[in-house]
Image (tube, rainbow, N blue to C red):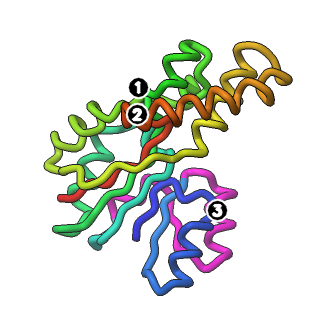
Amino acid sequence: ILDIGCGTGDFLSYMKQRGAEVQGVEPDADARNLANSKGINVIEPGQLASLNKKFRIITMWHVLEHVHLLKERMEQFETLLEEGGIIIIAVPNLKSFDAAYYGPYWAAYDVPRHLYHFSHKNMNQLFSNYGFKEVGCFPMYYDAYYVSMKSEEYKNSKLSSFIKGPLIGLVSNLSARKTHEYSSQIYVFTK
């Protein structure tokens, strides 16, 4: 497993304890050092191109929207993923109910840290351009509550975020049962 944007390595540590061979990539030096202290091999993003191995699974948990060189990263996926391997990507969904409801106050825009904003359609367009095919899409139910609470705080107040935010999160999840446009989604692609 290659986890890009692995933070302090908790996910990789969990997977390693279950017998997986793991590799992390993390730009933050403090997080990288903490992950390395847990016995996880974590490198800087600039070293990713020098990895001379293939991975069965590549993950990015709410990281793709932060990537500065998206084309380069997509090309690295092609190189680093073994034939038949999978890429698992979690990103906020631009077409969710909460995104439409909060408009410019939607917390998942998170500009300038989020450089890209994805929908189900453009995720498939992006990955198909590099020869990948979607094999699954799964909701991240709790993100609707968190994002709605933060959005409500930006739009109205901290107090409102605790009262109205969870309600909008619930409405977003209920709406997505019909539209399949959840606040955040996990995409699974294969080569």
Quadrant assignment for the C terminus: bottom left
- Residue 74 in the figure: left or right of residue 37: left
Q: Which residue is mark 2?
A: 181
Label 3 Cα crowd, 10 Å radius (few <14 / some 14-19 / many 20+)? many
Residues marked 1 and 2 touching at CB (< 8 Å): yes
Q: Is residue 148 above or below residue 8?
A: above
Tell me if 188 is positioned left or right of 61 in this view. Answer: left
Q: Is residue 158 left or right of residue 40?
A: right
Which mark is first along the chain, 2 or 3? 3
The amino acid type found where label 3 is placed reads Thr
Q: Residue at x 76, y 13 (%)?
A: 156
Alpha-carbon span between mark 3 and mark 1: 30 Å
Amino acid type of the residue that numbered disc 2 sits on in the rendered structure: Glu
Q: Give the residue at mark 1.
A: 95
Q: Which element is circle 2 on? A: loop
Label 1 sits on a secondary structure element that is loop
Residue located 51% across and 30% down the image: 114
Dot 3: what SS?
A: loop
